[in-house]
Image (cartoon, rainbow, N blue to C red):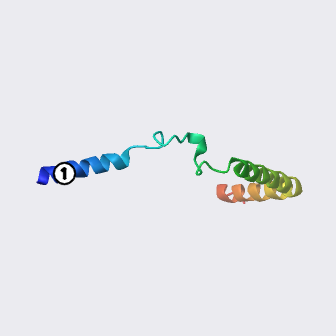
Amino acid sequence: MFHHLMNRFAVFVIGLSTDESHRRGERRGDRPDRGDVPGWVLITLMTAGLVVALWALAGEAFTSMFQDAMNKVRGAG
């Protein structure tokens, strides 16, 4: 009886762990959880644009702040 239950449990676990998407005819590109690639591209481009704009407007201030911080760390400030 115990072996019969263990065998049925093993078959159940193996059945859960197999990928049945190929049996249903699904392909990798047809899945709804594929992701939003254009959205990520837009976020990346907008972030790069913000960095360039901030650097153009306040580049000298950022460089000065960085140099001051480095001098304080080195003990020269």
Q: Farthest right residue?
A: 57
- Counting from the top left corner in percent of width and height, residue 34 is at 60, 48
Q: Is residue 1 rendered to the left or right of residue 63?
A: left
Between residue 18 and residue 25, name the one nearer to us: 25
Taking depth in this image into account, of 51 and 36 the one nearest to the observer is 36
The residue at 36%/50% (across/down) is: 16
User: Pointer 1: residues within 10 angstroms few (<14), some, or many (20+)?
Assistant: few
Q: Residue at x 15, y 50 (%)?
A: 4
Residue 27, placed above or below residue 63:
above
Residue 50 image offset from top left, x and y in percent: 81, 55
The residue lying toward the viewer, choosing from 21 and 74, is: 21
Looking at the image, which residue is at 57% across and 47% down?
A: 31
Q: Quadrant of the C terminus?
A: bottom right
Which quadrant holds the N terminus? Answer: bottom left
Closer-to-camera residue (31/55) = 31
The kind of residue on which mark 1 rests is: Met
Which residue has dot 1 on it? 6
Relative to 73, is 9 on the left or the right? left
The residue that appears at 58% across and 51% down in the rendered structure is 33
Give percent across and percent down for residue 73.
65, 57
Task: Report how many numbered discs are placed on residues in the image.
Answer: 1
- Does residue 13 appear left or right of residue 65 in this picture? left
Determine the secondary structure under disc 1: helix
Q: From this viewpoint, which residue is outermost toward the front?
A: 24
Q: Is residue 73 left or right of residue 57?
A: left
